[in-house]
Image (cartoon, rainbow, N blue to C red):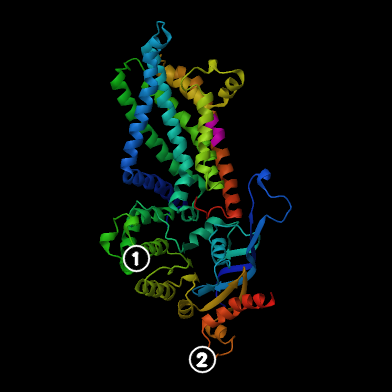
Amino acid sequence: MDEIAIHVREAYKVFHKQSLFPWNRKNGHGEKKRVVAVDSISFDVSKGEIFGVLGPNGSGKSTLIRLIATLLLPDSGAVTVFGHDVVHDRIAVQRLINRVSVEASFFKKLSPMENLIFGARLYGLSAQQARVQILEILTRLGLERSTISKPVEEMSRGMQQKVAIARALLTRPAVLLMDEPTTGLDPRSKREVQALVRELRDQDETTILLTTHDMVEAEMLCDRIAIMDAGKIVALDTPEKLCAMVPSHNGRSPTLEDVFLELTGKKLIEEDDVE
Amino acid sequence: MISATTRQLRASYAFVERNAHLVKRYWSWELVWLAYSIANSLSVSYIGLGMEQISGQEIDGRYLVLYLVVGTLVWRYLSLIFYWITDVIGLERWEGTIEYTLMAPIHRLTHMAGQTAFAVAYSLLFTAIILAVTVKLFQIDLTNANLFGMTLVMLSGSLSFIGIGIVGSILPLLFPERGAQMTHVIIAMLLLVSGVYYPVAVLPPTLRMLSVFSPATYVLDGTRKALLDGLPTAQLWPSIWPTLVAGAIAIPIGLWVFGLAERYAKRTGKLHRNG
């Protein structure tokens, strides 16, 4: 049996738009905004699997990643990484994971080298070890050596994203959480990142949880895909089996995009029809 | 395999090194800040020389200058420590890196120890420069001053301000938009009751009572005794022990409160918002 890397059981997360101070809170007129971001979802990801999460904006993908990344606490349910609970065993989980998000967040005045050494030290690496690895990873990502000592703010969005990926790889995570890592990248950079994702799984057996809006990317990279809508998983299977869920149109085999629209978009049309 | 202690030490040093890099990159801002601080100290100290003319009475202006110089220097030192520590969250919110730092497998004590070590070193250097300029300009004679005792009083006083700073740092965590500005209230209250520019005896009874609980009161008293009266180090003990006690209480409380605030931020999703 495959080893379970990520285990999510009935995870539930709701956000209340409410002030810390009681006198600022709305009074019983239903004005207090309540958003169920993750609605009792369950799934397992095996070690070495590339698991995709698709969903429209606001469907709960990033919240799910933050729950696994220990950046949010679930209201109920359980999330574990290689058996370690994200709430009760925070540091053990954090040693195993790293994350690449859609915003490549850095100290913008510092160089990639300074930013990456800072990140490496937080994970217990020495500067000497880190320097060697940084050069190796950035070269692997196709980043020129001359850019390594320039401030991050002088780099293009694509280059910054590569540095963000390097930051995650530097700690050799067993689980890599990638939240729309290729959004905003040019086609070439996108392909390089996609090749790297495959390489990480094939060579290092890294477990990857990937959220994306790019259906082709999801179909190409992921072993299994979960489609989320309004905080719930509406479908979960291999790309092939997901495609088989919808009928073909005009003799054309359905794509993942057709499945996505069928499961998320079509529902909205039906609601409009009712009105 | 590296030990857990080495891991945490490396992580702690990461904050020292990162802050040093930031100071280096923002060097022009540091110069402006230094010029502002020197001008501020001098303008307060000149009140001492002007008092004779203002009051029309014979006053020991040199003594008064030194009294005010001590006030400005001690206050600059303590407030710098406070601001560097409260900036532990504010800075990362500004850069958008907060989630990456709080996702790292480190204890909050490790995190704060690094930020604190840098804060103390930076504040000592900064204050020493202002002291050098002030001494030169006012031709202050420090031959009878107990500089060692003064440093000891200031270092022991740092501990309590570290604790207060950690408590203050929760404000940017809880209030992403205005939390950083809210920290000024804490420092303003301490400035009012601690006798920075006047003896606490002139305060009304309520404020005078509050001055007993401000560690800055003892730091200022001890520093003045060491610099103005040249009291030997052993006789400075009555000014040292209250600050040590305050530090021993404030630091654990600060860490505990920070832990609660971090949990609240993770429960309500406040880490994500970059204010």
Instruction: Please report the bounds of the magenta region as a residue range.
Output: B246-250
Residue located farthest toward the right when viewing the structure as drawn: A28
- The percent position of residue B169, horizontal first and vertical second, equals 52, 42
Quadrant in which the N terminus of chain A appears: bottom right
B55 part of magenta stretch: no
Tags 1 and 2 on a common chain? yes
Please state if A21 lies on the left or on the right of A222 as rendered.
right
| x then y, percent, for residue B64 | 40, 14
Disc 2 residue type? Arg
In this rendered view, identify the residue nearer to me: B96 or A8: B96
Q: Is residue B273 above or below residue A54?
A: above
Mark in front: 1 vs 2: 2
For label 2, the residue is: A252
Residue positioned 65% across, 45% down in the render? A24
- Marks 1 and 2, how far apart in space? 42 Å
Pick whichever, B191 or A270, lies toward us.
Answer: A270
Most extreme residue toward the bottom is: A251
Residue A239 sits above or below residue A146 on the image: below
Identified by mark 1, the residue type is Ile
Q: Provide the secondary structure element on which disc 2 rests.
A: loop
| Label 2 environment density (alpha carbons within 10 Å; few <14, some 14–19, many ≥20) | few
Q: Residue at x 69, y 77 (%)?
A: A274
Mark 1 or 2, nearer chain start: 1
- Furthest-top residue in view? B58
Residue name at image x 40 percent, y 64 percent: A165
Q: Main secondary structure of the magenta part?
A: helix
In the image, residue B76 sits, relative to residue B111, either above or below, namely above
Is residue A175 visible from the viewing direction of this image? Answer: no
Q: Residues within 10 Å of mark 1 (few under 14, many from 20)?
A: some
Q: Quadrant of the C terminus of chain A?
A: bottom right
